[in-house]
Amino acid sequence: MREKGKIAASIMCSGFDQVMDYVHEFERNNIEFLHVDVMDGTFVPNLAYGPDFVKRLRKKTDITLDCHLMVDRAEDKLDWFDFQPGEHVSLHYEGTCHIQKCLDYLAKKGVKPVIAINPGTPIQVLEEIADYIAGVLVLHVNPGFAGQKIVPHTIEKAARIRKYLDDLGHPEVYIESDGNITCENAAKLYKNGSDIFVAGTSSIFREGDIDELIMNLRKAIGW
Ligand SMILES: O=C(CO)[C@H](O)[C@H](O)COP(=O)(O)O
Protein backbone atom coordinates (compact mmCIF):
# COMPACT_ATOMS: atom_id res chain seq x y z
CA MET A 1 0.00 0.00 0.00
CA ARG A 2 1.20 3.48 -0.93
CA GLU A 3 2.25 5.65 2.06
CA LYS A 4 0.45 8.94 2.61
CA GLY A 5 2.27 12.01 1.28
CA LYS A 6 4.14 14.30 3.67
CA ILE A 7 4.22 18.09 3.80
CA ALA A 8 7.31 20.31 3.94
CA ALA A 9 6.02 23.82 4.74
CA SER A 10 8.08 26.46 2.89
CA ILE A 11 8.92 28.94 5.62
CA MET A 12 10.14 31.51 3.05
CA CYS A 13 6.48 32.11 2.24
CA SER A 14 5.63 33.33 5.79
CA GLY A 15 6.98 36.90 6.01
CA PHE A 16 9.71 37.54 8.58
CA ASP A 17 7.36 38.80 11.28
CA GLN A 18 5.17 35.69 11.11
CA VAL A 19 7.70 32.88 11.07
CA MET A 20 7.07 31.65 14.61
CA ASP A 21 3.28 32.07 14.38
CA TYR A 22 3.34 29.78 11.37
CA VAL A 23 5.73 27.33 13.04
CA HIS A 24 3.31 26.98 15.96
CA GLU A 25 0.42 26.32 13.57
CA PHE A 26 2.52 23.68 11.80
CA GLU A 27 3.41 22.02 15.10
CA ARG A 28 -0.29 21.90 16.03
CA ASN A 29 -1.06 20.30 12.64
CA ASN A 30 1.80 17.77 12.86
CA ILE A 31 3.46 19.04 9.70
CA GLU A 32 6.35 16.70 8.94
CA PHE A 33 9.04 19.15 7.73
CA LEU A 34 9.96 22.82 7.67
CA HIS A 35 11.40 23.58 4.24
CA VAL A 36 14.02 26.33 4.55
CA ASP A 37 15.14 27.99 1.32
CA VAL A 38 18.74 29.21 1.33
CA MET A 39 19.54 31.46 -1.65
CA ASP A 40 22.90 33.05 -2.45
CA GLY A 41 22.01 35.57 -5.16
CA THR A 42 24.21 33.83 -7.75
CA PHE A 43 22.85 30.31 -8.17
CA VAL A 44 19.40 31.91 -8.08
CA PRO A 45 18.53 35.58 -8.64
CA ASN A 46 17.34 36.12 -5.06
CA LEU A 47 18.61 36.10 -1.48
CA ALA A 48 17.03 34.17 1.37
CA TYR A 49 17.84 32.61 4.69
CA GLY A 50 21.39 32.01 5.84
CA PRO A 51 23.13 29.88 8.49
CA ASP A 52 22.14 32.02 11.51
CA PHE A 53 18.46 31.72 10.67
CA VAL A 54 18.77 27.94 10.30
CA LYS A 55 20.63 27.59 13.62
CA ARG A 56 18.06 29.69 15.47
CA LEU A 57 15.07 27.99 13.88
CA ARG A 58 16.24 24.51 14.88
CA LYS A 59 16.42 25.65 18.51
CA LYS A 60 12.83 26.84 18.43
CA THR A 61 11.01 23.79 17.05
CA ASP A 62 11.09 20.02 17.00
CA ILE A 63 9.84 19.85 13.41
CA THR A 64 12.55 18.31 11.22
CA LEU A 65 14.32 20.88 9.04
CA ASP A 66 14.46 20.30 5.31
CA CYS A 67 17.04 22.80 4.03
CA HIS A 68 17.14 23.52 0.31
CA LEU A 69 20.49 25.04 -0.59
CA MET A 70 20.19 27.08 -3.76
CA VAL A 71 23.85 28.06 -3.77
CA ASP A 72 26.93 27.81 -5.94
CA ARG A 73 29.90 25.87 -4.60
CA ALA A 74 27.99 24.13 -1.83
CA GLU A 75 31.23 22.39 -0.81
CA ASP A 76 32.47 25.70 0.66
CA LYS A 77 29.26 26.37 2.62
CA LEU A 78 28.07 23.11 4.17
CA ASP A 79 30.05 23.65 7.39
CA TRP A 80 28.36 26.98 8.03
CA PHE A 81 25.00 25.44 9.00
CA ASP A 82 25.98 22.90 11.62
CA PHE A 83 23.50 20.41 10.12
CA GLN A 84 22.23 17.87 12.63
CA PRO A 85 21.58 14.11 12.31
CA GLY A 86 18.13 13.40 10.89
CA GLU A 87 17.79 16.73 9.09
CA HIS A 88 17.21 16.71 5.35
CA VAL A 89 19.51 18.82 3.17
CA SER A 90 19.11 19.22 -0.58
CA LEU A 91 21.96 20.35 -2.82
CA HIS A 92 21.69 21.26 -6.47
CA TYR A 93 23.34 18.99 -9.00
CA GLU A 94 23.88 22.13 -11.10
CA GLY A 95 25.61 24.08 -8.30
CA THR A 96 28.81 22.15 -7.70
CA CYS A 97 31.44 20.07 -9.52
CA HIS A 98 31.85 18.02 -6.33
CA ILE A 99 28.35 16.72 -5.77
CA GLN A 100 29.37 13.22 -4.66
CA LYS A 101 31.83 14.63 -2.11
CA CYS A 102 29.13 16.95 -0.71
CA LEU A 103 26.54 14.16 -0.45
CA ASP A 104 29.08 11.94 1.27
CA TYR A 105 29.90 14.73 3.75
CA LEU A 106 26.21 15.03 4.68
CA ALA A 107 25.75 11.27 5.05
CA LYS A 108 28.75 11.08 7.39
CA LYS A 109 27.07 13.68 9.60
CA GLY A 110 23.90 11.58 9.76
CA VAL A 111 22.02 14.07 7.59
CA LYS A 112 19.66 12.79 4.85
CA PRO A 113 21.38 13.83 1.62
CA VAL A 114 18.99 14.96 -1.10
CA ILE A 115 19.83 15.89 -4.68
CA ALA A 116 17.88 18.82 -6.16
CA ILE A 117 17.43 19.07 -9.93
CA ASN A 118 16.11 22.00 -11.96
CA PRO A 119 13.35 21.58 -14.56
CA GLY A 120 15.86 21.45 -17.46
CA THR A 121 18.22 18.92 -15.88
CA PRO A 122 17.92 15.38 -17.28
CA ILE A 123 17.05 12.59 -14.87
CA GLN A 124 20.01 10.52 -16.06
CA VAL A 125 22.33 12.59 -13.83
CA LEU A 126 20.92 10.49 -10.98
CA GLU A 127 22.67 7.36 -12.20
CA GLU A 128 26.10 8.11 -10.69
CA ILE A 129 24.77 9.44 -7.38
CA ALA A 130 21.79 7.20 -6.61
CA ASP A 131 23.89 5.24 -4.09
CA TYR A 132 24.55 8.41 -2.08
CA ILE A 133 21.10 9.97 -1.74
CA ALA A 134 18.05 9.60 0.47
CA GLY A 135 15.84 11.65 -1.83
CA VAL A 136 15.46 13.68 -5.01
CA LEU A 137 14.05 17.21 -4.82
CA VAL A 138 12.32 17.81 -8.14
CA LEU A 139 12.03 21.49 -8.99
CA HIS A 140 8.77 22.16 -10.79
CA VAL A 141 9.69 25.83 -11.29
CA ASN A 142 13.04 27.45 -11.96
CA PRO A 143 14.01 28.15 -8.36
CA GLY A 144 14.38 31.55 -6.74
CA PHE A 145 10.89 32.87 -6.20
CA ALA A 146 7.62 31.78 -4.70
CA GLY A 147 4.42 32.24 -6.67
CA GLN A 148 5.56 30.92 -10.07
CA LYS A 149 3.67 28.64 -12.47
CA ILE A 150 4.64 24.99 -12.85
CA VAL A 151 6.84 23.98 -15.82
CA PRO A 152 4.37 21.48 -17.35
CA HIS A 153 6.70 18.62 -18.32
CA THR A 154 7.88 18.26 -14.72
CA ILE A 155 4.61 16.59 -13.74
CA GLU A 156 5.43 13.48 -15.76
CA LYS A 157 9.13 13.92 -15.01
CA ALA A 158 8.32 12.78 -11.45
CA ALA A 159 6.95 9.50 -12.83
CA ARG A 160 10.07 9.02 -14.97
CA ILE A 161 12.30 9.64 -11.95
CA ARG A 162 10.36 7.09 -9.88
CA LYS A 163 10.80 4.46 -12.58
CA TYR A 164 14.45 5.37 -13.13
CA LEU A 165 15.28 5.04 -9.42
CA ASP A 166 13.39 1.75 -9.18
CA ASP A 167 15.23 0.41 -12.24
CA LEU A 168 18.55 1.47 -10.68
CA GLY A 169 17.60 -0.64 -7.64
CA HIS A 170 16.73 2.30 -5.36
CA PRO A 171 13.03 2.09 -4.47
CA GLU A 172 13.84 3.56 -1.04
CA VAL A 173 14.96 6.92 -2.47
CA TYR A 174 12.05 9.33 -2.03
CA ILE A 175 10.84 12.07 -4.35
CA GLU A 176 10.04 15.55 -3.08
CA SER A 177 8.18 18.03 -5.27
CA ASP A 178 8.84 21.78 -5.02
CA GLY A 179 7.24 24.74 -6.78
CA ASN A 180 3.60 25.63 -7.48
CA ILE A 181 2.30 22.68 -5.47
CA THR A 182 -1.41 23.43 -5.68
CA CYS A 183 -3.78 20.72 -4.49
CA GLU A 184 -4.42 19.84 -8.13
CA ASN A 185 -0.72 19.54 -8.99
CA ALA A 186 -0.05 17.67 -5.74
CA ALA A 187 -2.71 15.06 -6.59
CA LYS A 188 -1.13 14.44 -10.02
CA LEU A 189 2.37 14.29 -8.54
CA TYR A 190 1.31 11.94 -5.75
CA LYS A 191 -0.09 9.64 -8.43
CA ASN A 192 3.23 9.93 -10.30
CA GLY A 193 5.25 8.87 -7.27
CA SER A 194 6.12 12.02 -5.28
CA ASP A 195 6.29 11.43 -1.53
CA ILE A 196 6.93 14.87 0.01
CA PHE A 197 5.30 18.12 -1.09
CA VAL A 198 6.73 21.59 -0.54
CA ALA A 199 3.76 23.70 0.48
CA GLY A 200 4.06 27.41 -0.30
CA THR A 201 1.87 30.22 -1.60
CA SER A 202 0.07 27.75 -3.89
CA SER A 203 -1.48 25.83 -1.01
CA ILE A 204 -1.13 26.72 2.66
CA PHE A 205 0.33 30.25 2.74
CA ARG A 206 -2.79 32.00 1.54
CA GLU A 207 -6.00 33.53 2.83
CA GLY A 208 -8.17 31.07 4.70
CA ASP A 209 -8.29 28.81 7.70
CA ILE A 210 -4.86 27.22 8.06
CA ASP A 211 -6.22 23.88 9.35
CA GLU A 212 -8.53 23.66 6.36
CA LEU A 213 -5.80 24.63 3.86
CA ILE A 214 -3.53 21.93 5.29
CA MET A 215 -6.33 19.35 5.27
CA ASN A 216 -7.15 20.15 1.62
CA LEU A 217 -3.53 19.50 0.66
CA ARG A 218 -3.42 16.32 2.75
CA LYS A 219 -6.54 15.02 0.99
CA ALA A 220 -4.76 15.48 -2.37
CA ILE A 221 -1.82 13.33 -1.24
CA GLY A 222 -3.49 10.19 -0.03
CA TRP A 223 -4.96 11.12 3.39
O1 LIG B 1 11.59 26.84 -3.68
C1 LIG B 1 10.80 27.72 -3.71
C2 LIG B 1 11.00 28.81 -4.68
O2 LIG B 1 12.19 28.60 -5.41
C3 LIG B 1 9.66 27.75 -2.75
O3 LIG B 1 9.92 26.86 -1.69
C4 LIG B 1 8.38 27.34 -3.37
O4 LIG B 1 8.38 27.52 -4.75
C5 LIG B 1 7.29 28.14 -2.79
O5 LIG B 1 6.06 27.62 -3.13
P1 LIG B 1 5.03 28.26 -4.20
O6 LIG B 1 5.61 27.97 -5.55
O7 LIG B 1 3.76 27.53 -3.92
O8 LIG B 1 4.91 29.72 -3.92
Image (cartoon, rainbow, N blue to C red):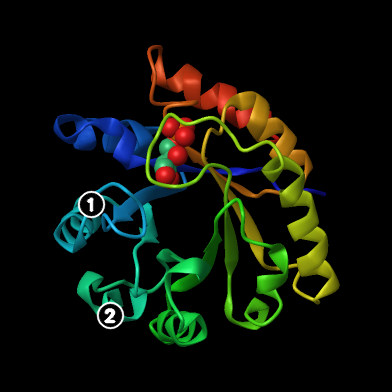
Q: Quadrant of ligand 1?
A: top left
Give the side of residue 16 with respect to residue 191, left or right.
Answer: left
Q: Is residue 19 above or below residue 99?
A: above
Q: How many numbered badges does the structure rendering display?
A: 2
Instruction: Look at the image and tell me in which quarter the C terminus lies.
Output: top right
Q: Quadrant of residue 71?
A: bottom left
Residue located 49% across and 17% down the image: 212
Q: Secondary structure at mark 2?
A: helix
Which is more N-terminal, label 1 or label 2? 1
* CB-based contact (under 8 Å), mark 2 and mark 1: no
Q: Is residue 136 above or below residue 129?
A: above
Give the number of the disc on residue 76: 2
Residue located 42% across and 79% down the image: 106
Give the side of residue 193 with respect to residue 125, left or right.
Answer: right
Few, some or many C-alpha atoms within 10 Å of disc 1 (few <14, some 14-19, many ≥20)? some
Give amino acid for label 1: Tyr
Residue 129: percent from left, percent from top: 62, 80
Q: Is residue 182 above or below residue 23?
A: above
Mark 2 or mark 1, whichever is nearer to me? 2
Q: Which residue is mark 1?
A: 49
Residue 116: percent from left, percent from top: 52, 61
Does residue 26 appear in this view? yes
Does residue 30 appear in this view? no
Give amino acid for label 2: Asp
Q: Secondary structure at mark 1?
A: loop
Q: Quadrant of residue 201?
A: top left
